[in-house]
Amino acid sequence: MKVLRQIYQLSVRECGIFLHNPIYVFCMVAFPVAVIFFFTSLLSSGQPQEMPVGIVDLDNTSTTRALIRKLDAFQSSEVVAYYSTPAEAREAIQNNEIYGFLYIPEGTTEKLLASRQPKISFYYTMTTIVSGSLIFRDMKTIATLGSAALGMATMRAKGLTDQQIKTLLQPVTIDLHQIGNATTDYNAYLTTVMVPGIIMLFIFLITTYAIGTELKFSRGKELMEMGGSKIWIALVGKFLPHTLIWLAVTFFYSYYVFGVLEFPHPGGVLRIILLNVLMVLAAQGFGLFAFGLMPSLRMSMSISSLWAVLSISMAGSAFPLIGMDGPLQTLAWLFPLRHYFMLYQIGVLNDYPILDAWFHIAALIAFVLLPIMVAGKIKNAMLTYVYIP
């Protein structure tokens, strides 16, 4: 009972600190919620739509105009301008007016009807990989459809049936199954790692800030006295309100993306809850560990911010981990977000047995327990260290 009373008193003390320091409200509630809505609204369409493209049509026949209309009808491309020369269109790309253009030289239709293999060209910018890839896909599809349409007309004139034509044009039929993200929704793909990564950044920073300000404002001895000179009681009592608030924020995030926006989550609610709990506790554990390594407010916050920013790249969502160099693949295991992302993929998104992710669960639990290694150093800092700006 005495221990519970001490933890309660420390938690009440921490809530009082919250009320007198608005940084906690902004960094624990306002900013994370703003990040959630910002990223989900930024990618609300699922994929980039109606990206501007240009046309250089020197042939200007009914056949080429039909191809251009088909290109304009695609969801991700919109024909916004016509140019008289490729040089003008290239300049428009350089001025960020269009993402690419289709160049149709003079005589294309004539060569096409004569089966002389005319050449049309795609020019597109890969400065932005997503837009470049989507526009290339649309332009390539248009070229394929144009040649296929002419081939169908020629074979019909020779008396072939539709089934024979289909077999000749497409000998192998592709049956495509996109597992996990069937609609290629970039919102579900990117938000589920970017938002947790930024929330972890806030947890890292607020955890080190909260324990560091005890040292900065000479409240360390008071903290230890209220904890009965036991560092684990002091830390549990101090960070219990933090944990509850962070859990509320992550549960709100999960409800919004999986419940309201209906991101795929065949793994079920229980795994999402487990994922959120492990994420919050692991991030807090790493923040305390960073402070224990360097009991300095400035240095521990610098370590935490650096680790959080790097973790977004090392998680393996934007660039697969298997494609990185060997040392980087090894280093990635030291980032909590990497294990969160893998546990999300295995258990929530793909609904594989949770035991398949046991190593990542163990790694997150190890991050939770990291403060044990530096608890003595944190206690010593609270009792003896003098804050140096």
Image: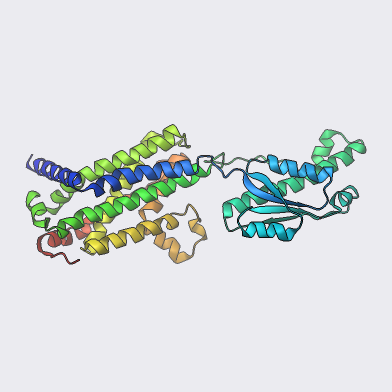
Front position in the image: 214 or 87: 87
Q: Horizontally, is 315 left or right of 73 in the view?
A: left
Rendered image coloring scheme: rainbow
Taking the spot 16% from the left edge, 60% from the top edge, the residue there is: 216
Q: Horizontally, is 134 left or right of 181 in the view?
A: right
In the depicted structure, whether residue 359 falls above or below residue 327: above
In the depicted structure, whether residue 282 falls above or below residue 37: below
Taking the spot 45% from the left edge, 37% from the top edge, the residue there is: 265
Quadrant (top left, top right, bottom left, bottom right) of the C terminus? bottom left
Taking the spot 88% from the left edge, 54% from the top edge, the residue there is: 116
Q: Quadrant of residue 106?
A: bottom right
x%, y% of residue 209?
23, 55
Q: Quadrant of residue 215?
A: bottom left
Taking the spot 18% from the left edge, 57% from the top edge, the residue there is: 375
Residue 367 visible in the snapshot: no
x%, y% of residue 301?
28, 59
Front position in the image: 64 or 241: 64
x%, y% of residue 364?
33, 50
How many numbered badges does the structure rendering display?
Answer: 0
Quadrant (top left, top right, bottom left, bottom right) of the N terminus? top left
Q: Horizontally, is 51 left or right of 43 in the view?
A: right
Residue 43 visible in the snapshot: yes
Work out which residue is located at the far right of the displayed protein and give it: 158
x%, y% of residue 355?
40, 44
